[in-house]
Amino acid sequence: MPVPLNIAHRGGAQLWPENTLPAFISAAEAGYDAAELDVQLTRDDRLIVFHDFRLKPGLCRTADGEWVRRRRFGPTPSIRELNYSEVRNFEVGRAKPGGLYARRHPHVDWRDGVVMPSLAEVIAGVRAINPGFRLFIEIKTALRRRGLSAPPEAVAEAVLGELHRQQCVATAVLVGFDWRGLVHAKKRCGTVQCWFSTLPRSRRGAHQIADSGGDGWFCPLTRAKAATIDSARASGLRFGVWTVNRSADMQRLIARGVDGICTDRPDRLRQVVVYRS
């Protein structure tokens, strides 16, 4: 039975600080197949790796140790509001002790002095360890909040530019919920792999992905049923599932022959694969 790709979600968010260079390097060193990461454009159009559209309280802090807080009359600044140099002033390698994020990630190997990496740094870092290590790059754009992020086409264009500069199109898979960016990427570079993401309650599925030019379906766990997987296969799509952290779910998906499993616990998935073999 084929073994699915072991994709470390945000670099392995239950093992290392999410979306950080130490996480991606650790995932590559551990011998996992791939890592998923989120990329956005700063105000000066630099690609930065971070999940939330805004600085996250309880995770972001200044170099002098002050934790980011919501502003009195509004939310924290967005990545799109800040220049690359400003974003790099915030550390993201340690959650605030006792905070909600820290409580939800109790086993993380926290690191000090860690800032948001650029996409270029992540690519260079993992390729130095394993040139074949794959990156599932989410084009992170706001679907309904205009101005909260850069346009999807702009992010896709910037990502493609970096992939071409580092000659690693073949080891990259673009994913994302805003399909406009993926459609743009396929038009600009037909060889880049694009797995279209869907939300748990979305009615969009295999036919719409195939009609949009997708190569695969990046499906939420709650929708990854036998009929869904079969529909993807019938449409000629590869099938990946996010975010899968329970061993029982991993075993079921492996038995169904999915192509990739995105997990916060790639170490657990490896154990399940070894046990089944």
Image (spheres, rainbow, N blue to C red):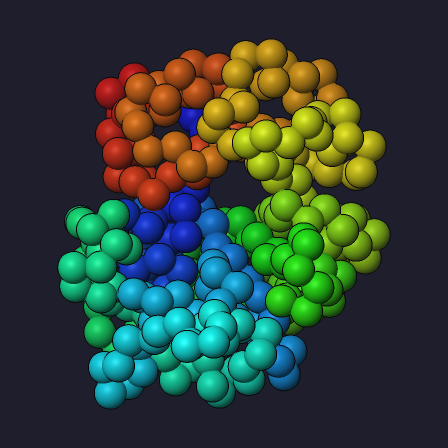
Along the viewing direction, whichever of 41 and 33 lies nearer the viewer: 41
Q: Is residue 196 visible?
A: yes
Answer left or right for 129 relative to 188: left
Answer left or right for 218 relative to 186: left
User: For the point 48% across and 87% down, which residue is it?
Assistant: 85
Relative height, residue 112 to residue 95 (above, below): below
Residue 159: image location, x then y, percent: 64, 64
User: For the point 77% across and 30% down, which residue is it?
Assistant: 208
Along the viewing direction, whichever of 240 and 270 lies nearer the viewer: 240
User: For the point 76% across and 25% down, which residue is it?
Assistant: 207
Q: Is residue 160 visible?
A: no
Relative height, residue 97 to residue 180 (above, below): below
Quadrant of the image containing the C terminus: top left
User: For the point 41% across and 77% down, which residue is it?
Assistant: 72
Answer left or right for 203 relative to 47: right
Relative height, residue 231 to residue 157 (above, below): above
Residue 249: image location, x then y, percent: 36, 22
Residue 222: image location, x then y, percent: 48, 25
Residue 105: image location, x then y, percent: 24, 50
Along the viewing direction, whichever of 182 and 5 lies nearer the viewer: 182
How many numbered circles does the render carry? Answer: 0
Answer left or right for 12 relative to 219: left
Quadrant of the image containing the N terminus: top left
